[in-house]
Image (spheres, rainbow, N blue to C red):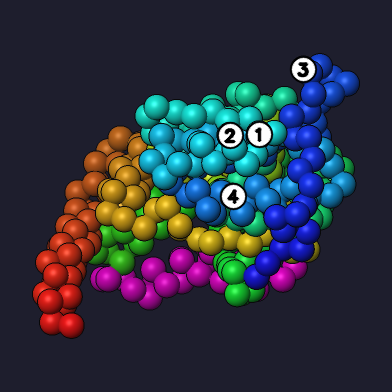
Amino acid sequence: MSIPGCGDDALPPDFSGGPRGVAHRPDLSVVIVSYNTRELLRNCLRSLRGSQGLTLEIIVVDNASSDGSADMLRKDFPEVQLHAQTLNSWYCGGNNIGSAAARADYVLLLNPDTEVSPDALAQMLRFLRENESYSAVTATLVYPHGAIQQTCAGIPSFENLLLDYTLLGWLRSRRKKQHHAELVYADWDRKSDRDVAAIPGSCSMLRRSDARLDDDLLLYFPEEDLARRLGGRMRFLATARIVHHEKSSTRNWLATRIFFRDMLVYTRKHHSLWRMLLLWLLSRPVYWAMWLRRHAAAQNQPNTASGM
């Protein structure tokens, strides 16, 4: 799926917001954390150039990419505020760097593997401005071929974590299925607006004063942690659409390791130390089974190649 108004010939607006000061403050600061997603990031920024109905400040935090992302930004998008890191600050740390530099009253945390439709951000911003009781808003995320992604969810309980990430889920499969369906709003097709408990970190618009994430988390569970901290209502807007090339930079074993690590950090923070230790113990068989499966696949890959 392509986004209209985002071609190479689109003229770049001045995203800088001008000199610091209230008179030149942009309507929205867009914070993008990127790690080795150069071409996806390029398409994302092209789509942002086509945004209508608001002024933008674009902030990209590059987490020490090795694919030339920072050079591409300097050459092709000089209007973007680049924060090039020498070390990987991860998702949460990178977003905090970007949010700290933001000048608008509202901040959008946006993944680099997205392409924004021209009116999506204006719709989201209008909703937040007109509904002060809501703490955050998100858009409909769709795959490149147009299918709607099943984003947004409830806040997982400790039982949810046990059922989803330990062998207890196999022993109590019916209960796991029921709890998971409730958690992910399985009865909702994402074709209508709805209040939700937690919105995806790939597209989260909120007030700048609420935008700081927990630095103890690296990649996972910031949405659930943020929802618990803010406590306010969050909204899903069906008519605001954004293309999302899901998991483009997290398809590796390191990401899996970080997921289990962040899950334990989140559990300790919100469910107590002893429950974290219990979850660590019970999740080990699942963790090692995933490692063994990946290791076996890696061992078989050369054999498969040699047999071709």
The magenta region covers 170-199
Q: Which residue is mark 4?
A: 42
Q: Secondary structure at mark 1?
A: loop
Residue type at mark 1: give it.
Pro
Q: Which residue is mark 1?
A: 78
Left-right relation of 149 to 129: left
Vertical placement of 208 versus 201: above or below?
above
Q: Is residue 133 visible?
A: no
Q: Residue furthest bottom?
A: 308
C-alpha distance separating marks 3 and 2: 21 Å
| Label 1, residues with CA under 10 Å away: few <14, some 14-19, many ≥20 | some
Residue type at mark 3: give it.
Arg
Residue type at mark 4: give it.
Arg
Instruction: Tell me which residue sits at (74%, 29%) in the image.
Output: 16
Q: Picture quarter containing residue 146?
A: bottom right
Say whether disc 3 or disc 2 marks the residue closer to the N-terminus.
3
Q: From the viewer's side, name the closer residue of 181 and 297.
A: 297
Residue type at mark 2: give it.
Arg
Q: Which residue is mark 2?
A: 74
Say whether disc 1 or disc 3 marks the residue closer to the N-terminus.
3
Say whether disc 4 or disc 2 marks the residue closer to the N-terminus.
4
User: Disc 4 vs disc 2: which is toward the camera?
Assistant: 2
Q: Secondary structure at mark 3?
A: loop
C-alpha distance separating marks 1 and 3: 18 Å
| Labels 1 and 2 touching (C-beta < 8 A) | yes
Q: Is residue 182 magenta?
A: yes
Say whether disc 4 or disc 1 marks the residue closer to the N-terminus.
4
Residue 98: percent from the left, percent from the top?
58, 30
Q: Which residue is mark 3?
A: 20
Q: Picture quarter containing residue 269?
A: top left
Instruction: Tell me which residue sits at (58%, 68%) in the image.
Output: 143
